[in-house]
Amino acid sequence: MSLEKLIKQCAKNDRRAQKEIYHLYAGKLFSICLKYSKNRDEAQDNFQDGFITIFNKIGQFNFRGSFEGWVKRVMLNTVLLKYRKKRVLNIVSEEIPDEVVVDVDDDEISLDFLLNLIRELPERYRLVFNLYVLDGYSHREISEMLNIAEGTSKSNLARARAILKRRVEEYQEQQQSI
């Protein structure tokens, strides 16, 4: 069955078509949920809510542009909406610290370790860090997506980088003392 036909069948609540769409995109969409959730359980909840939203709104897909891009955007928006409702994005100050550069020796620190450090960031910092650094959104786009000021986005990014730098340096010091 073609993708267009699958999408049209999903809009009619065809369970077999929904299952096929689910299997086509589950891996990519779950990775988005993992990136924006603080743990696997939260990611699974976000993933389930996102697929419910996708199937409820699939009739709105207008076959212009990539369907994969559309489902990724719906999933991301579903996850971000939960955070906006929790109001985790408010910070007291919008002062922007100086740019922080994190020096990482690839031989000493694994990608899994770095991803765990990112996952441990406070939610508001993790969201902005992921959107800006990993997904390439601008501060203006992030401010619109998260309903925050651009300065808040910049400040949250700088603070996330500072936390990551401190934790990487602590880890490297520990490794050198062993």
Image (tube, rainbow, N blue to C red):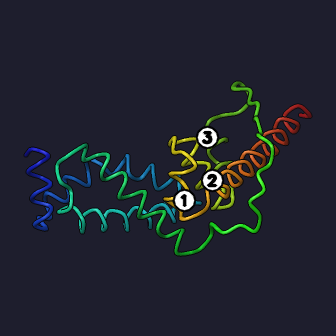
Q: Nearer the viewer, residue 149 or 175?
A: 149
- Mark 2 and mark 1 in contact? Answer it, CB < 8 Å: yes
Marks 2 and 3, how far apart in space?
10 Å
| 132, 164: nearer the viewer | 132
Between marks 3 and 1 in the image, the one whose residue lies nearer the viewer? 1
Q: Which residue is at 80% across, 43% downward? A: 98
Identified by mark 1, the residue type is: Ser
Indicate the amino acid at tag 2: Arg
Give yes or no for contact between labels 2 and 3 (Cβ–Cβ under 8 Å): no
Residue under the point 55% across and 57% down: 143
Q: Image check: 173 left or right of 95? A: right
Which numbered disc flags the more N-terminal residue, 3 or 1? 1
User: Residue 175: image x %, image y %?
Assistant: 84, 34
Q: Position of residue 42 (x, y in %)?
A: 51, 65
Q: Position of residue 41 (x, y in %)?
A: 51, 64
The residue under label 1 is 37
Dot 3: element: helix
In the picture, the quarter occupied by the C terminus is top right
Amino acid found under the numbered disc labelled 3: Asp
Q: Which mark is residue 119?
A: 2
